Amino acid sequence: MSATKTGYFTHAACRRHEMGRGHPECPERLDAIEDRLLATGVLDALERREAPEADLDAIALAHDPRHVALLGELRDEIAEQVEAGGYAYNHIDPDTAMNPHSWDAAVRACGAVCAATDAVMAGELENAFCAVRPPGHHATRGRAMGFCLFNQVAVGVKYALDRYKLQRVAVVDFDVHHGNGTEDILAGDPRVLMVGIFQHPFYPYSGDHPRGDNMVNIPVPAYTKGMDIREMIDAIWMPRLEAFKPELIFVSAGFDAHREDDLGQLGMVEADYAWITQKLKDVANKYARGRIVSSLEGGYNLDALGRSVEAHLRVLADL
Ligand SMILES: [Zn+2]
């Protein structure tokens, strides 16, 4: 058995997308992750790959063509504003905006997840982490919201089903916020099982009534501790994942349920992220030849984010 190979997919465009001074979903998030992985030597153990641009046809597997066209129009408007000597953000909602680089960043984020899927399916990599922005799990089939433009994990799932004719793909979402966009896109598809845990009631105020039998949602109250979250995952996620026997696992890896993260009020710590990752790895090793494609979602306390991604990657890469 050869050593685990873990990919690290990212692109400079993901650093150039920003939504205004003081916005928590900031470029420095990627710096914090890379600085931490560099300082700890974890980055040396990963295979770094440039995220390509996603094929727009792949994005259209998960999104309404009108949504893709609308973001394209906003991109063109911003380009005209820049051309005219101005620079303004195009606001989609109070939390979500585009700057001149946002389209590229969102397309590269989708490209990262699709390329990571190709690499693990080809057996070049065992698993992969996509260090990308903007996040994606709030973007629905037809709408950008909650810092998200395109839903890269949902795009990756649809791409994997379409390209590799897989029958069983799992999605795991441990961000503090419910992955309403992913649920919107994947609910009712019998080839997909999505398991999530999130603070509730909390933004985006959904998930307590799952929209399909293939959605396993665990809403938890504010101040739930990591140990309690582990117990619920063991009791509720794991039997469903075991019964489903996924051929590939996607992770919406948000780290804003960390107890130091002010955007949420849950009590997870690095050891909890390592524990969850090991659980997923055990399932992947049993049924999916180890194949896991993980993509960054939330995580806004920069220091906690760096440490949490490090913990996640140490398990993925067997370090
Ligand atoms: Zn979040």
Image (cartoon, rainbow, N blue to C red):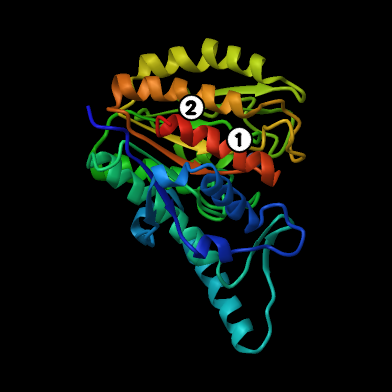
- Residue drawn at x 56%, y 28% is 273
Q: Quadrant of residue 162?
A: top left
196 to the left or right of 128: right
162 sits to left or right of 224: left
Q: Residues within 10 Å of mark 1 (few under 14, many from 20)?
A: many
Quick check: is the Cβ at mark 2 less than 8 Å away from ligand 1?
A: no
Q: Residue at x 52, y 49 (%)?
A: 38
| Mark count | 2
Mark sitting earlier along the chain (1/2)? 1
Is residue 133 shown left or right of residue 203?
Answer: left
| Residue 141 x, y percent position in the rendering | 50, 48
**Which of the 4 image quarters holds residue 193?**
top left
Q: Quadrant of ligand 1?
A: top right
Q: What amino acid is found at the position of numbered circle 2 in the picture?
A: Thr
Say what amino acid the circle numbered 1 marks: Asp
Q: Nearer the viewer, mark 1 or mark 2?
A: 2
Regarding mark 1 in the picture, which secondary structure is present there? loop
Q: Is mark 1 within 8 Å of ligand 1?
A: yes
Residue under label 2, please give it. 277
Which of the image's four quarters has the N terminus? Answer: top left
| Residue 237, percent from left and from top | 50, 18
How many residues crowd around disc 2 within 10 Å: few (fewer than 14), some, or many (20 or more)? Answer: many
Q: Position of residue 15 (x, y in %)?
A: 56, 62
Name the residue beneath numbered marker 1.
175
Residue 139 seen in the current view: no
- Which residue is nearer to you in this view: 236 or 278? 278
| Gap between marks 1 and 2 measured at Cα | 13 Å
